[in-house]
């Protein structure tokens, strides 16, 4: 009788290899969206998948602190909204340089994340959730009170960001490829971070923070840095969103938008390096399809999400295929 020895490490590597191929295949197919839109006369597809890419960036940033760090933030959309408002306000005052807008958006969101995270991370559990929610609501009501910039009616953006004539973001295809390139870059960045010593400490804080403290790691500062990085990336996504919609509104900062980002992360799997991207695709496409059939699409959308949660317990991307555990 022959005894088969299973090399678990080799099998795991095969899963990781397959997973990487899946992400490469997905980004390759996504790059063909403009071609699909032209051949089949479906221009809406470009706008839809531009939005998919932008929200995937925001979902990836949330996944870094929620999925890997166990920091359940109910105010992550605040950074998306702050980034969007930064672009809108700068554009309102005549500053349309894209590099300046993106840089200022990212820095402001990193600063706000540093402030809110420094306070929220002094707590745990429900207290952490409520503090992140409170900071987001502060920004939400502050945006509502900005009567000079439209208040609760929002602020239209006259022109998209300009990059010295190198990129004309008035062209929807170029904006799409900018969002796709940004998504690939952010995905690669978080992959590298989660595999690094820093990322392993963040995961360790989630699994057993007491043990990490006993090993000599200053977990508070590690988590704060992760929180700031996530906020900065979400702000970058917000700057892209402002360009895509041509409009900013306090609704971008609402707790319901934070909930939507959480749903994208959960649908794809927690934690999963590529899951939030798939979650963004499912969320945005499902919303678009249902809204085209009925004005009561939210009801069916909610039922669909309940079904995904109840019957997709093993999640769309199984943990064994997650390359974050390489």
Image (cartoon, helix red, strand yellow):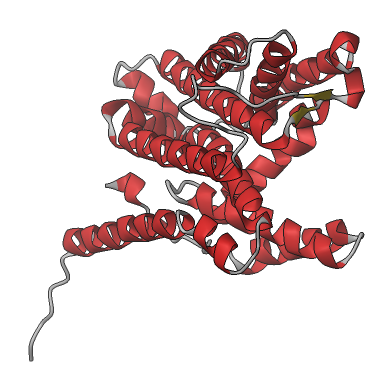
**Which image quadrant for residue 124?**
top right
> Does residue 254 appear to the left or right of 316 in the view shown?
right
Nearest the eye: 131 or 86: 86
Q: Position of residue 81 (x, y in %)?
A: 70, 25
Q: Position of residue 233 (x, y in %)?
A: 52, 27
Q: Relative to 324, does residue 44 appear above or below in the rendering?
A: below
Nearest the eye: 34 or 314: 34
Residue at the image position 67 percent from the left and 16 percent from the top: 86
Residue that sits furthest to the left in the current view: 1
Q: Relative to 318, does residue 113 appear above or below in the rendering?
A: above
Task: Look at the image and tell me whether residue 269 can be seen.
Answer: no
Q: Relative to 142, does residue 208 appear above or below in the rendering?
A: below
Residue that sits furthest to the bottom in the current view: 1
Q: Position of residue 234 (x, y in %)?
A: 57, 28
Q: Position of residue 63 (x, y in %)?
A: 52, 39
Question: Looking at the figure, which quarter contains the N terminus?
Answer: bottom left
Nearest the eye: 11 or 79: 79
Residue at the image position 70 percent from the left and 43 percent from the top: 260
């Amino acid at each position: 009788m022959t005894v088969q020895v299973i090399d678990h490490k080799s099998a795991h590597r095969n899963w990781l290899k397959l997973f990487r191929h899946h992400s490469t295949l997905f980004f390759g197919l996504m790059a063909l969206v403009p071609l699909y839109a032209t051949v089949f006369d479906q221009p809406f597809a470009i706008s839809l998948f531009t939005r998919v890419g932008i929200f995937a960036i925001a979902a990836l940033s949330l996944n870094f602190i929620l999925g890997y760090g166990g920091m359940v933030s109910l105010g992550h959309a605040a950074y998306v909204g702050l980034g969007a408002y930064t672009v809108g306000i700068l554009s309102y005052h005549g500053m349309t340089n894209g590099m300046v807008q993106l840089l200022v958006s990212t820095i402001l969101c990193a600063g706000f994340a540093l402030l809110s995270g420094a306070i929220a991370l002094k707590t745990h559990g429900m207290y952490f959730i409520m503090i992140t929610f409170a900071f987001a609501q502060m920004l939400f009501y502050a945006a509502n009170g900005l009567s000079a910039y439209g208040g609760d009616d929002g602020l239209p953006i006259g022109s998209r960001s300009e990059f010295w004539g190198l990129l004309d973001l008035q062209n929807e295809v170029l904006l799409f490829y900018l969002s796709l390139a940004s998504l690939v870059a952010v995905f690669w960045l978080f992959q590298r971070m989660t595999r690094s010593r820093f990322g392993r400490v963040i995961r360790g804080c989630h699994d057993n923070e007491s043990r990490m403290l006993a090993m000599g790691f200053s977990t508070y500062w590690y988590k704060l840095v992760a929180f700031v990085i996530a906020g900065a990336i979400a702000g970058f996504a917000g700057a892209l969103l402002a360009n895509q919609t041509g409009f900013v509104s306090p609704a971008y900062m609402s707790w319901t938008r934070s909930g939507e980002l959480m749903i994208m992360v959960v649908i794809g799997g927690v934690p999963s390096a590529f899951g939030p991207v798939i979650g963004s695709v499912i969320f945005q496409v499902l919303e678009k399809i249902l809204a085209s059939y009925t004005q009561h699409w939210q009801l069916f959308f909610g039922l669909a999400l309940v079904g995904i949660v109840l019957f997709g317990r093993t999640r769309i991307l199984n943990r064994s295929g997650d390359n974050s555990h390489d």
